Amino acid sequence: MVVDGSKLVRKLIGDVLQREVTDVEVVSCGSIREAREALAAGPVDLVTTSLSLPDGDGIALARSVREDAAQRYVPVIVISADAQAHLESRRFTEDVTDYFDKALGHTALAAFIRGYVQPQPIPGARVLYVEDSRVVALATKRMLERQQLTVLHFVGVEEALEYLEQHRGQDDIGTDLVLTDVYLKGKLEGSDLLDRLRKDFGYGKRRLPVLVMTGDANPDNQSALLRAGANDLVLKPIEERLLVTKTLFQLRLSKLP
C-alpha cells in the first residue's frame, strides 16, 4: 500500500515498485480515510506513507494500521525528505517500523522495500559485530548467518579497533558493516567505536555503515548516536526481521553509485 497526498508521488513510487519488485500489487491511497477503507477490504504486506497527508499524518496512519488486528505486524515505512530529522528527534512512534529518506533516490527505495517484502541474502558480506554478552551474541549471529552473512564477532571495542587498524589505508577495510552494542564492559563503549570510525579512521556512512544496538529508551541518547554518525539504530530486544532488513539495506545502499 502506497499512501501519499500527491497522485504523482504515488505513481512514481508505484512505478518503481512494479519495475523492481517481483509480482507486486500496488494499492494506491491519497488519504488516511482511503487507506483505512483499503485495509478493511483485505490484508497488505507493507505500507509506505508520507508524513503529511490531507486528513492527518503518517504517524496517525501507522497507528490505524496497528489498531487493525489483521495488520498488526505489517511493516509501516515512512517516506519523507524530513525522515532523518524526525529520526534524530525521535518523533517516530513505535507504530512506525522504519523510515526512508527521499534524498536517497528511487533505486535505493526499491532496494529498501524489497528488503522487507522479498529479502535477498548477500552471501559473504562481512559484519563486524561487537557484543560482550555471549548469549546475545550467539543468538544475533545466528540471525545474520541465516542470511549468509559472515559475522566477525568481538567482545570489546579494543579488539575490534585492533582488527580494523590492520586494514587501515587498504582498499579492503576488513568489513562491510559494523554492528555494535552501545553499553559494553570494557573501557570503550559502542559510542567510542562510532566516534573513532567517523573521526579517526575517516569512514563515512556509505564507506562503512554502522548500526548501533541499544536498549536505552532515552530519546536524547538515541539522537546523540545518530548525530554522531550512526546510520541507524536497532532497538533491543532485537526483532530479527527488523535487524536483518536494516543490515541488508545498509549493505546494499553502500554499494550503490
Image: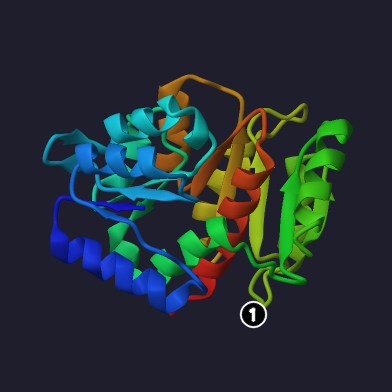
Query: What is the x, y in percent for residue 108?
Result: 42, 68
Three-letter amino acid code at the position of disc 1: Asp
Residue found at x 54% / y 36%: 73
Please name the residue shown 67% across and 34% down the image: 238
Colouring used for the render: rainbow
Residue 241 image point, x, y percent: 64, 46
Is 97 placed left or right of 156 in the picture? left
Residue reaching furthest to the top: 218
- Residue found at the far front of this picture: 41
Asked if residue 215 is positioned above or below residue 26 in the image, the reply reads: above
State the residue at coordinates (63%, 37%): 190
Q: Is residue 26 left or right of residue 213?
A: left
Residue 89, image x and y in percent? 32, 31
Give the percent coordinates (x, y) of residue 198.
Answer: 51, 53
Q: Would you identify the image quadrant in which residue 194 lies?
A: top right
Q: State the residue in front, 199 or 151.
A: 151
Decide which of 227, 239 is in the foreground and name it.
Answer: 239
Q: Secondary structure at mark 1?
A: loop
Q: Residues within 10 Å of mark 1 (few under 14, many from 20)?
A: few
Query: Which residue is at a point 53% across and 40% down the rendered structure image?
Result: 233
Closer to us: 255 or 148? 148
Q: Which residue is mark 1?
A: 171
